Amino acid sequence: MTSQRLFPLSCVVQNYAWGKVGQDSEVAKLVVGGDPQAVIESGKPYAELWMGAHPKGDALIKDNRISQRTLGQWIADYPGCLGSKVKDTFQGQLPFLFKVLSVNTALSIQAHPNRELAAKLHAQFPEHYPDNNHKPEMAIALTQFEGLCGFRPVEEIIGFLKAVPEFHALVGNEASDELQSSVGNPGRISLALKKCFSRMMNCEKKVFVDQLNMLVKRVSEEDCIECMACSDNTVRAGLTPKYIDVNTLCEMLNYSPAPASAKIFPSVQDPSDPCVYLYDPPVPDFTVMRIQIPSSVKQYTVSPLDCAGILLVIQGEASATSAAALADMMLQRGSVLFISANESVTLQVTSSTGMTMFRACCLL
């Protein structure tokens, strides 16, 4: 393998309409932090920063000594960089896509397919579902963040049906009564909830639009880290100019009500490194580490793993040294590094307030 197994990346920005605009966007600020020459347009939304090798957003390698232009090309030539387990399990592909989201208005009403449905949708409608991979996701808040995920406990939904007449009008008396009478019977609850949601999502567009502000609480001024399987498959049903597929969305959902606490799992401190906090979801494709270096620590080693990773600096500055790099690198807010499997990075921290970084990887 090539002697250079660690290098900086220039990552792709997605300018979706829901993103924060210009320098108000955390994505834009990180782009400028990583490249002071970058030009940010004041009226343009900067919604997502994609850090990975997905075909729609393959990161550029910021080192002219490396002949490959993109991370995807480099991994294709040197798949051993992924680590043997990841290389064999994911057929020589980087299994995750790492992102920063900067949200100004609500994203679409959406869900992501499992592997079986993703393959079916991609085969039938490749123009709308661009790959055959599943897309489990995990979001980690960078600022105060509110998200809507899954279905509330059924008692809360019934309470809203009674308290919000506009909501009741969209769902209808029959479906509302059916949900209320299903309490205590989990099987009936799921069927009744599916009926309520399907009725609401299939009502006339004008009626739905008229009541939209009563039904959807728009998120505002929020930023998060996101990691997912390397896919761009999204089934959407509203709040978007993109392709809408209401029937597929209504059929694919898991209609199991649950409290918000069931959708959240806390980070766990790494017993071998007090600076590292693990977010390890129940899927094999990805894990995210938050690395919080206190101001008292001036030298820190980013430990080697038996898988490749992508490191993002959110706050702080350091000089980075590694046997896998041809020269020292200066890291600052917005810097993104690709780290091959089994490689470490030594940081000489120069900022007085320590550092905050996130590292995406695949711990099989």
Image (cartoon, rainbow, N blue to C red):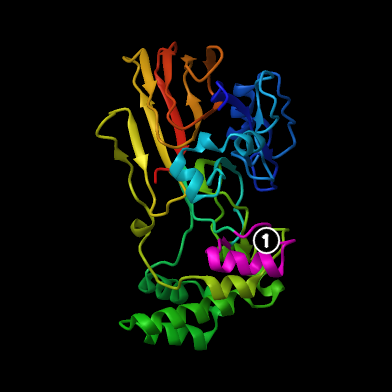
Amino acid at pointer 1? Tyr
Q: Position of residue 306 (x, y in %)?
A: 41, 36
Image point 50% across, 20% down: which residue?
A: 324
Element on which disc 1 rests = loop
In the visual, does 262 lie left or right of 111?
left
In-image side of 198 versus 270 (left or right): right
| Residue count near mark 1 (Cα–Cα under 10 Å), binned few <14, some 14–19, many ≥20 | many
Q: Is residue 200 visible?
A: yes
Which region of the structure is painted magenta?
Answer: 110-132
Q: Position of residue 317 (x, y in %)?
A: 48, 16
Where 62 sits versus 286, above or below? above
Tell me what residue is drawn at x 71 percent, y 62 percent: 128
**Picture layout, residue 82 above or below residue 293:** below
In magenta stretch: residue 257: no
- Give the residue drawn at x 47%, y 44%: 86
- Quarter of the image for residue 61 reads top right
Of residues 182 and 319, the one nearer the viewer is: 319
Quarter of the image that includes the N terminus: top right
- Residue linked to disc 1: 129
- In the picture shown, does residue 59 fall above or below 219? above
